[in-house]
Amino acid sequence: MNLAALDLHLLVAFEALYEARNVTRAAERLGIGQPATSASLARLREIFGDPLFVRAAGSMQPTPKAKRLAPTVAATLADLRAMLGENLPFDAATATRKFTIASTDYTSMIILPPLVADLRQHAPGIDLRVIGYDKGDIVHLIDRSEIDLALGVFRDPPERAVRKLLCAEFFVGMARRGHPDIEAGSMSLEKYAAQPHALVSVRRDATGEIDSALAAVGLARRIALTIPHMLVLPELLAHSDMVSAVPNRIAQRFVADGLQSFRLPLDIPAWNIEMLWNVSARTDQAHTWLRERIANVALTI
């Protein structure tokens, strides 16, 4: 390929097309007309000898070659933007900016309260927009830069994502105070398996880590209730004999709601709570500042 044929605006167009997966939306991001964006795509196809983006499932999906090019294009443009002074010195005390964060019920409950308090003190002009997400949404949310950050558990993060460990977490049992089968803060394995269980699941299924651990010892449980939101769980447990497995940090908060936690009679590995962001944000000083604040908050929870 002749580098002289590839000018900067074509790389910017590639980035917009990759993130938007739509010519019209890419044109809006670029501030130019759709015909000009289509012309840029045609030129890119000619230069790279590949369609780069093909219509599928109602959008422009990147080809394997486009996926290989995307991280290099993003890193190159980020470096150029920094060199040209696009990232001006960031002053948190006077900055005005909005960040979009994808977060689960769990990460919202344990991270957002101290984070918001921190921002109100050190960066009063910073606004947050927090959205929920399905696990399958994270790839396009990150790849298309529709969010600034994602908080949660990510076993298969997107190609363009950078990840940072925030903290480790583990399950404990949760039930109403005075539950007849809890003795000295624990419950036998047989009694635990025989309980009616409440499961919090955002995936709309009725299985979890507990089921795999029970199956390994030849047992199964009855899922009496499946719910998508953790915040309703205390009220449900307080007025029934159901039990549930919840993250330890959440259990500490639920104890004040008339509940008690107990040791699970199963060996359930701990898991990591992480923060994800698009590699293209690595030189954004405001973005870097926010990531540092979240990481510092995570040390206190």
Image (cartoon, rainbow, N blue to C red):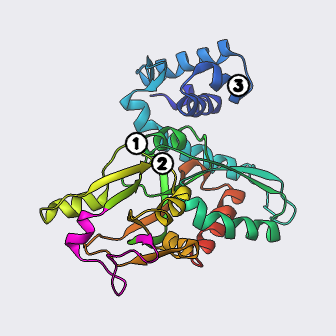
Q: Which mark is residue 28?
A: 3
Q: In the rendered structure, which amino acid carries the disc numbered 2?
A: Pro
Mark 3 or mark 2, which is nearer the start of the sequence? 3
| Direction from residue 62 to residue 282 in the image, left or right | right
- Callout 1 secondary element: loop
Question: Is 25 situated above or below 138?
Answer: above
Which is more toward the observer, 181 or 112?
181
Which is more toward the observer, 193 or 87?
193
- Callout 2 secondary element: loop
Q: Which residue corresponds to mark 1?
A: 204
**Residue at image point 84% right, 63% down:** 124
- Nearer the observer: mark 1 or 3; the answer is 1
Mark 2 crowd level (few <14, some 14–19, many ≥20, 10 Å Cα): some
User: Horizontal and vertical percent for residue 204?
Assistant: 40, 42
| Direction from residue 56 to residue 282 in the image, left or right | right
Give me the C-alpha separation between circle 1 and circle 3.
35 Å
Q: Are marks 1 and 3 in contact (CB under 8 Å)?
A: no
Q: Which mark is residue 228?
A: 2
**Residue at image point 39% right, 65% down:** 241
- Callout 3 secondary element: helix
Mark 1 or mark 2, which is nearer the start of the sequence? 1
User: Horizontal and vertical percent for residue 23?
Assistant: 59, 20
Give me the C-alpha separation between circle 2 and circle 1.
7 Å
**Residue at image point 59% right, 55% down:** 282
